[in-house]
Image (tube, rainbow, N blue to C red):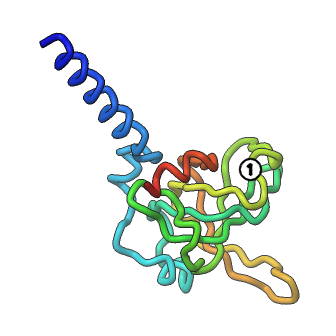
Amino acid sequence: MKKQSRLLLLFLAAVALLIAGCAHVISSESRRLAAKNIPFQWIAQNPDRYKGIMVIWGGQIIETRNLPEGTLIVVLQRPLGRFEQPIEDSRPQGRFLVLYQGFLDPAVYEKGEMITVAGIIEGEKVMPLGEIEYRYPYLNAREIHLWMPDEMSQYYY
């Protein structure tokens, strides 16, 4: 009987670790407040229409800049998976900007890294992108999660 108890305890510990390893990275409050049924493309076409709405978006960092008002991150949008992880092999649907009210180190939040952001839509910013002017949906960040490579892989299994 003692061996069965140990096996049951080991099994329950493994299940608990598995569940904890696949938790949401954005708080339940932000998930509750975020708009869920508005496609990124709709907002990207007319960000001013959606001002004040909280969204949860993610993708790949293109650039991180520190400015007097905070850290500005340019993100190549990617659809999110079940636990808010950007789906790496998905087709991007555009770009967006994130303003974080504070300092984020560009050596940590560097090009190519994946992030998930809960933020309030502030409208749009027009900035140069190569030879054109690009209209970026613009978020004021409430939460940012920087994905570690090993963390990303556990969400795909």
Q: Is residue 103 left or right of residue 12?
A: right
Is 83 situated above or below 1?
below
Q: Is residue 156 left or right of residue 10?
A: right
| Nearer the observer, 20 or 57 | 20
Based on the displayed image, in which of its 4 quarters is residue 89 positioned?
bottom right
Q: Secondary structure at mark 1?
A: loop
| Nearer the observer, 4 or 153 | 4
| Nearer the observer, 46 or 13 | 13
Q: Residue furthest left?
A: 1
Q: Residue furthest top?
A: 2
Is 111 situated above or below 71?
below
Q: Amino acid at mark 1?
A: Tyr
| Residue drawn at the location 45% of the way across and 60% of the way down | 54
Q: Quadrant of the C terminus?
A: bottom left
User: Looking at the picture, how far across and down is residue 73, in whole percent?
Assistant: 72, 59
Residue to which mark 1 is pinned:
109
| Residue drawn at the location 37% of the way across and 39% of the way down | 18
Based on the displayed image, in which of its 4 quarters is residue 78 positioned?
bottom right
Number of numbered discs: 1
User: Looking at the picture, how far across and down is residue 10, in whole percent?
Assistant: 30, 24
Q: Residue furthest right?
A: 131
Q: Quadrant of the N terminus?
A: top left
| Nearer the observer, 111 or 57 | 111
Is 114 situated above or below 19?
below
| Residue drawn at the location 79% of the way across and 85% of the way down | 133
Q: Residues within 10 Å of mark 1 (few under 14, many from 20)?
A: some
User: Looking at the picture, how far across and down is residue 4, in whole percent?
Assistant: 17, 19
| Residue drawn at the location 34% of the way across and 31% of the way down | 14
User: Looking at the picture, how far across and down is residue 77, in whole percent?
Assistant: 60, 71
